[in-house]
Structures are given as structure tokens and as C-alpha cells.
Image (spheres, rainbow, N blue to C red):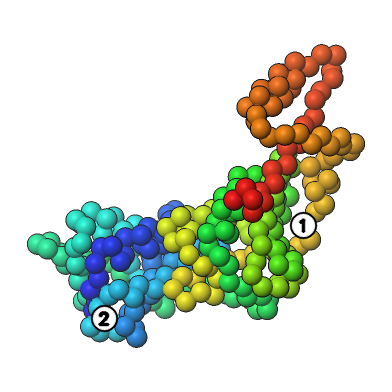
Amino acid sequence: MKFSAKKEALADKLSLCSSIAEKRQTIPILSNVLLKANNGNLTIVATDLERQLSLIVSDCSISDDGETTVSARKLFELIRSVPDDTELNFEVIENQLEISALSFQADLAVLPVQDFPFVDLEDHNFNIGLDGSKFGKVLESTSFAMASADVRYYLNGLLFETAQKKINMVATDGHRLAWGSYSHSEDLEDKKLIIPRSTALELQRILNLFPEEISFFAIALIVTARVCIPAFPPIDATIGIKKAKTTICSIVAPNRLMHQVARKAVNRFNNNQLNLLFVFVITPSVI
């Protein structure tokens, strides 16, 4: 395998892949990324057995097709250290990846390609293309409410729902709840799935770098992840509401509202508690 590419074409994509590649090195191959050069493109793949990220670099020059695996962290740190607009040359020579640019040369150890694992795909007959900008804004506005290590596993993620021409996302940790929604251009089949917390956070990082249209099976960027498809519990059962009183108020002065809430929550007398539930609703008008 032999190819060349500029730093700008590789740095951001290797940054994403290195964040997914296993850092604990429980299985050595998981700390590597797969580099595959063919059909004039370079494909970079990283996985931790739960998530798999595939990125295609088209702005490169392929001399010889081939594939290999190399340490994600070492490769990213080396490429990040070179000056901008630097042309890097890559070539596999005797179980080593030789990288040369300017006046330096580095050799990185490689592992067998056949040892690299891939996430098994299940056919759920669900394929959708989304507006990356709108999806990213709603994701960022709701993901903060996800639980991190709850025994109720369905809370350690984000509910993604399609209904008619609406995309809805809901996250809760049992104490707070965030709900976001935006309109889609086409009619959609009614579907629900739970995106795991780690995948939702990784999608945020990806959309910050590439705020374009995304798809579960896109051409230049493929995110594969295991998802849960249980029935998301009723919100009132999850939060634990017994008798709720709803108050609709203006949001003109949110600081004043929160100040009053904090005073009432702190000042408790005779075992009288103030139980509050904040539901954050993100609508297209807010976005």
C-alpha cells in the first residue's frame, strides 16, 4: 500500500477515529485504525466493538492499493505535529508503515488486517437521511439530560423518534427531561430507537466538525452503532410524578425565575419540600 495526502485532509478525521479507538488496549487491535486504499480513495475505520466510524478521504493520491492497521493515537499525534499544508507520504514496508514528509521519516508498527473486528450490522429496515445542522442543534440541546450510569439502561441514551414529518428526541435521567423536535421535509414511518450515550456524544463531535447532511449509511461518513429498541417508558413513570401542577409562565426573565426557585428550594420548613420538574422543550422557533 502506498499513498500520499495533505495534513488538512487527514487531521480532523483521524481525531474522530482516535477518540473511538480503544485506549485501554484490552485488545491490542482495538487501539488501531484500519487504513484501506482502493478506488482512488482512502478509508479510515475505527471501532470499540460498540461503535464503528468509517471515514472516506477523497483528497489523496493512491499509488498502490492495499490495507493495514496502525495505532490511532500515534498516527494522529504524528500528523498533528507537522506544519499545516504538509504533504505526507505513506508506504507499508515489511510490517511497518513508513511515513515521510519534509526532512523526517517515521516507522509505525502494524497489526494483521484479518484481526481487525467489525461491528455486525442488523437489518432493521430503517434508513433515513437527516439535515445535519438541525439534527445537531436538537441533539446538543437535549443530550445534557441523559443519564450516565443508571441501572435503568434505557435512560443511558437518547430516544430518537420519527413521526409523520417530525423528528423528536427525548432524554432524561429521572430528575430532569429535555425534549427537542424539528420538521422533516418528507413523510416518515413511525419509528423509535434509543441512541446510546456514547454514540450520541460522538455524533455531537462529528457534527461540530462536519455540519452537513448525515445518514446511518452515508457515502463519506458512516457511523455504525448498536442501538436499543425497547419501549421508552412513560415520562411521568420515569420522573416519578404523582400529582403534578403545571404552571405556564413567560420566559422573559429566566434569571429572576431561577433565583426565586432556588430560594424556595433551599428554604424548607417542617419537612415541606418543593418538588420541581423542569421540562426543556426545544422547538424550531427557538432553533
Relative placement, left or right, of 268 versus 117 is right
Which of the pair 149/130 is nearer the observer?
130
Kind of residue indicated by mark 2:
Ile
- Residue drawn where x is 65% and y is 44% of the image: 145
- Residue drawn where x is 58% and y is 67% of the image: 130
**For the view shown, which residue lies furthest in the top direction?**
269
- Estimate how packed mark 2 is, as few (under 14), some (14 to 19) or many (20 or more) residues with alpha carbons within 10 Å: many
- Residue drawn where x is 55% and y is 56% of the image: 136
Q: Which residue is mark 1?
A: 232
- Residue drawn where x is 83% and y is 45% of the image: 236
Whole-angstrom CA distance, mark 1 to mark 2, is 47 Å
What x and y, as percent, mark residue 260? Answer: 71, 22
- Estimate how packed mark 1 is, as few (under 14), some (14 to 19) or many (20 or more) residues with alpha carbons within 10 Å: some
Q: Quadrant of the N terminus?
A: bottom left
Tags 1 and 2 touching, CB below 8 Å? no
Q: Is residue 260 visible?
A: yes
* Residue 62: mark in rendering: 2
Q: Quadrant of residue 184?
A: bottom right
Compared with residue 35, is residue 280 higher up or lower down, i.e. above or below?
above
* Residue 49: mark in rendering: none
